[in-house]
Image: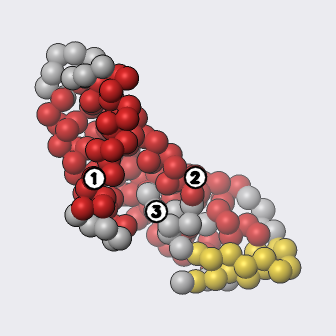
Amino acid sequence: MRIVQDREDARGLPARFHFAIFKLAAFVRMKFVTPRERRGVLIVIDRDQSAVEHYIISAWITALVICFLSAVMPVILAIPLATIIIQIPLFTICRSNIDTNSWLMFTLVGIAAAYLLHRHTWIRFVALSYFLIIAINLLAAAIMMLLHSDVREMEARCGL
């Protein structure tokens, strides 16, 4: 665990985010933020610190599962069933490993999206949106790899 002291602008460092889309957004934001020193501030640099990022991803996955289920059942049943279905793999297979949970969830949703992509109804557009978001995240990851030295320089300015 790394800690930044007396630098308020370190809250937006890319190292505090998990997914490449959010890291790239943080990098762009940090390019336009002026360095701010603030005495008494301690900021932990951990890639799982962004609650907003995790809420956005979990809401997106939940919405996808609800849409996938509503393609085969009424929405009124799909909503509670989706919340239950999402929890089953998390508590039965990989209880406390965040990375394994993420891979498992994205794999299961990806399998469902691949299956539903071949249907000739509205659900194929929802399934396609899953793959588009994954592709955008992969593109953001490639861009972040190219910007690796700039990110290190940004972190060094904040004392990392």
Q: Residue at x 30, y 61 (%)?
A: 91
Give the answer, above or below, for where 36 lies relative to 50.
Answer: below
Answer with left or right where residue 109 lies relative to residue 83.
Answer: left
Does 78 appear above or below 154? above
Q: Please report whichever mark, 2 or 3, sits nearer to the chain's N-terminal start.
A: 3
Residue 158: x and y, percent?
68, 77
Residue that mark 1 sits on: 88
| Residue at 68%, 70% in the rendered image | 10
Quarter holding the N terminus is: bottom right
Q: Nearer the viewer, residue 21 or 153?
A: 21
- Dividing the picture into quarters, in which one does residue 152 lie? bottom right
Quadrant for residue 42, please give it: bottom right
Question: Hey, what amino acid is under mark 1?
Answer: Ile
| Amino acid at circle 2 | Val
Q: Is residue 157 visible?
A: no
**In the rendered view of the protein, which quadrant contains the C terminus?**
bottom right
Q: Which residue is mark 2?
A: 52
The kind of secondary structure element at disc 1 is helix
Q: At label 3, which amino acid type do we have?
A: His
Horizontally, residue 57 falls left or right of residue 111, namely: right
Where disc 3 sits, the SS reads loop
Residue wearing tag 3: 18
Gap in Å between the C-alphas at discs 2 and 1?
23 Å
Q: Which mark is residue 63?
A: none
The foreground one among 50 and 145 is 50
> Which residue is pictured at 53% across the width and 73% down the height?
46
